[in-house]
Image (spheres, grey):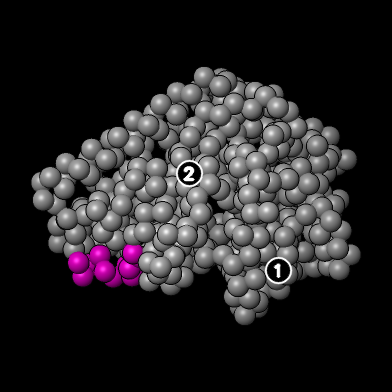
Amino acid sequence: MVYHQRTTCRACAGTGLHRFLELGPQPLANSFLRNQAEFTAEAKYPLDVYYCADCSLVQLLDVIDPAVLFRNYIYVTGTSETIAAHNVAYARSVVEVLGLQPHDLVVEIASNDGSLLKRFRDAGVRTLGVEPASNIAAIAREDGIDTVDWFFTAEAAVKLRAQYGPARAIIGNNVLAHVDDTRDFLRGCRTLLADDGLVVIEVPYLLEFIDRLEYDTVYHEHLCYFAITPLLRLAEAAGLSIVRVDRVPVHGGSIRIYAGPVERHRNHGAAVLTMAARERAAGLTSLARYERFAVDVARNREAIRALLQSLKTQGKSLAAYGAPAKGNTLLNYCQLTTEWLPYTVDRSPHKIGMFTPGMHLPVLPAEALQANRPDLTLILAWNFAEEIMRQQRAYSDQGGRFILPLPTPRVV
């Protein structure tokens, strides 16, 4: 079955679920189309966001079969300078915190093309990738990163431990949000983890999501939107304690949690509990805060459309930069068709020559921006805005301007 809808919360199994944001029926954000003949058969699914009053987890209840989403994946991490620099610092931090040695094993779940694991390999430690997308796993193996193309579950963790031994570090980088059975995933991490090891999980931070109005990061792959409060409950259910949390700027503001076996770490870290208290003070455990967020989202859509319409009325030519999943949520929610944005450009060879889901913008090479020189370009990949504007300096030097869509649309 390609699609089903949950009736209970992933963290607490409760039923106190309240829908607060409706982004409309949307296509799968990474299901790019090869040609116009595919347009009419494009499937769409509800994209609604819920708040659990019992444990405060923010989540989607509409679930797409992960084999449909991830077995043949189009997103690779190795194309961004920002992510490359982030990975170097990420690996260095984990190596230092755990004092990793050459015999230690680092396992990354959803390891993509192995870009992060390469940084651990550079540090001289053993690595293993677990990546369900067979096409992306093959890229990692070609680069010398040992990778199994499995979905990670508690059952898979037993097999991995038997074959490779326990892991001192288990990395989950922007994957926990993709998992329908969150508790099973974390229990699997505990099974695979060495007694003196740590599970290191990085996720976009709900507080930043709310404060910066990052609604475009909602798409069917992202089933959960995490704050510390529900993560504490999930960790406890898996036999883990969260001992440390780092704030990191990537992807619009993320958190990196370090969790160890409860037998070794009896309590959550004091600083971690302080963060949870701050979340309560900020309203993240109150439905009213999310209802205000939904009102602001609707206002943002109208503001984006008003700005682009004003520019069109002035005779300005427009285009977009980037073909990220988040961009497709924004394009579809705001109904920005090719009449508004004739095309977008991107650096990923996996997307160039394709059409974006739903709005069907053709994806051109990044060089097309300089060649065509539209008056203004909407940056859909706003989390890489500084990198993009630096790379496109020649375009801006010749008079091109950029538009950032969130939290308030503005020309920069």
Relative side of 72 to 385, left or right? right
Q: Quadrant of residue 296?
A: top left
Q: Which of the two discs, 2 and 1, labels the residue nearer the N terminus?
A: 2
Quadrant, the N terminus: bottom right
- The picture places residue 77, in percent across and down from the top left corner, at 52, 63
Relative side of 153 to 345, left or right? right
Q: Tell me the number on the disc at residue 149.
A: 1
- The picture places residue 209, in percent across and down from the top left corner, at 49, 37
Q: Vertically, is 352 above or below 375?
A: below
Q: Amino acid at mark 2?
A: Pro
Secondary element at image label 2: strand
Q: Vertically, is 272 above or below 105?
A: above
Evaluate whether residue 180 shows in this view: yes
Evaluate whether residue 246 shows in this view: no
Q: Which residues are magenta?
A: 362-372
| Label 1 environment density (alpha carbons within 10 Å; few <14, some 14–19, many ≥20) | some
- The picture places residue 78, in percent across and down from the top left corner, at 51, 67
Q: Tell me the number on the disc at residue 25.
A: 2
Query: Which residue occupies the foreground of this view, 266 or 40?
Result: 40
* Membership of 366 in magenta stretch: yes
Residue at (42%, 35%) from the top-left corner? 213
Direction front: furthest residue: 40
Relative side of 377 to 227, left or right? left
